[in-house]
Image (cartoon, rainbow, N blue to C red):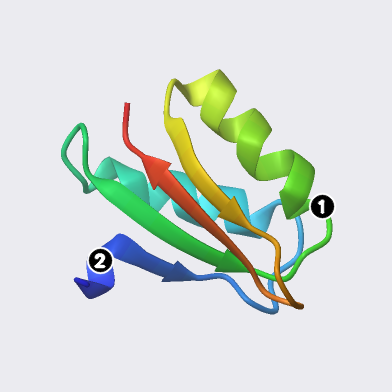
Amino acid sequence: MDDRNTLDAVGLLCPLPVLKARKRLQSLKTGEDLTVLADDPAAVIDVPHFCAEAGHVLVSTDLDGPVQTYVIRKG
């Protein structure tokens, strides 16, 4: 996987994971996926809300363990 398609936001607190995801998504083409890794408990709410508001698709969410993995498809 390309580094520009992975965002390691582990250790960052709200709203930084979403702000960094928004910035990274700007450099991707519509339909490309961004994998976001986060451990902020608020990300469980923030990431799906961000996707809904910004018109992106939340392809998958993996909440197994301390690090959450989100796959966002640019809308």
- Provide residue 30's location: percent of width, then percent of height: 20, 32
Mark 1, other Cα within 10 Å: few <14 / some 14–19 / many ≥20:
few
Give the amino acid type for the residue marked by disc 1 in the picture. Ala
Q: Is residue 47 above or below residue 8?
A: above
Q: Residue at x 43, y 30 (%)?
A: 57
Q: Residue at x 63, y 43 (%)?
A: 47
Foreground pick, 2 / 15? 2
- Provide residue 72's location: percent of width, then percent of height: 42, 44
Q: Residue furthest right?
A: 41
Q: Residue at x 35, y 39 (%)?
A: 73
> In the image, which disc is placed on residue 24?
none
Mark 2, other Cα within 10 Å: few <14 / some 14–19 / many ≥20:
few
Q: Is residue 45 above or below residue 19?
A: above
Q: Is residue 34 above or below residue 22?
A: below
Give the amino acid type for the residue marked by disc 2 in the picture. Arg
- Provide residue 67's location: percent of width, then percent of height: 68, 74
Of the 4 image quadrants, the one containing the N terminus is bottom left
Quadrant of the rendered structure where residue 7 is? bottom left
| Cα distance between the residues tagged 2 and 1 | 24 Å
Is 38 left or right of 44, judged from the image as shown?
left
Of the 4 image quadrants, the one containing the C terminus is top left
Contact between labelled residues 1 and 2, with CB atoms less than 8 Å apart: no
Q: Is residue 42 above or below residue 1?
A: above
Is 25 left or right of 16, judged from the image as shown?
left
**Would you name the residue on which mark 2 appears?**
4
Is 40 left or right of 23, judged from the image as shown?
right
**Would you name the residue on which mark 1 appears?**
42
Q: Secondary structure at mark 2?
A: helix
- Provide residue 29's location: percent of width, then percent of height: 16, 39
